Amino acid sequence: MAETSKTVYEFSAGTLDGRSASLSEFKGEVLLIVNTASQCGFTPQYAGLEALYRTYKERGLVVLGFPCNQFGAQEPGTAAEIGAFCERNYGVSFPMFAKIDVNGEKTHPLYRFLKKEKPGLLGPLGGGSIKWNFTKFLVDRSGKVVGRFASTTKPESLAKRIEKLLQNR
């Protein structure tokens, strides 16, 4: 039973600049957690993610980017290269984390949790696996995972859901 009471705040991850960050730093915020890649057809979604972040950060939205190289080796860069790419091409100012695995035996514990909470279209039968880059998880202010969205879901299409979560203080 204790497993179901977990929140995203119980996890930590390395950042692009090499420090360890606890997600508890974001307690009380609405989070949009995304596995990212720099050389993907969905990479332009960085612009939409940044726009959401800039529009709503003062009201409590934080976008968290987690680079992943598991899909078509589309994130081959080092932490410094990933950071420079995101800043140079998309002006990314939201927190970016170190490269992680989102599937398989080395799945980051945060992603193990996210997939358990929102297993996706095929549910538990599909193992909850992430299908591609830019899968998005929406987390409410209490740290509960409230939505999972496919790579094809444009960040801007989440604005109404985000606004509704931001109203709940």
Image (cartoon, rainbow, N blue to C red):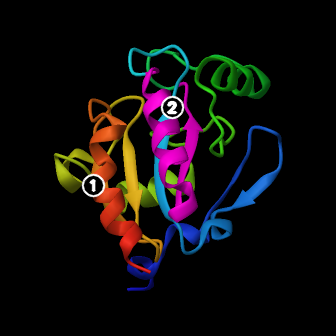
Give the side of residue 167 with respect to residue 124, left or right.
Answer: right
Front-most of residues 153 and 93: 93
In the figure, 15 relative to 12: above or below? above
At x 27% / y 54%, what residue is drawn?
160
Report the magenta residues as a range: 43-69
At x 63% / y 28%, what residue is drawn?
91
Three-letter code, disc 2: Thr
Disc 2: CA contacts within 10 A as few (<14), some (14-19) or many (>=20): many
Q: Which residue is mark 1?
A: 160
Q: Position of residue 164 (x, y in %)?
A: 30, 66
Secondary structure beneath label 2: strand
At x 46% / y 73%, what residue is drawn?
141
Front-most of residues 147 and 68: 147
Give the side of residue 68 with respect to residue 123, left or right.
Answer: right
Earlier residue among tags 2 and 1: 2
Any magenta on residue 75? no
Q: Which residue is mark 2?
A: 36
Q: Position of residue 154 (x, y in %)?
A: 31, 34
Tell me which corner region of the image, top left, top right, bottom left or bottom right, holds residue 101: top right
| Image quadrant where one finds the N terminus | bottom left
Front-most of residues 39 and 122: 39
Q: Position of residue 159 (x, y in %)?
A: 32, 49
Numbered disc in front, either 2 or 1: 1
Three-letter code, disc 1: Lys
In the figure, 138 relative to 64: above or below? below
The answer for how far apart the CA atoms under marks 2 and 1 are is 22 Å
Secondary structure beneath label 1: helix
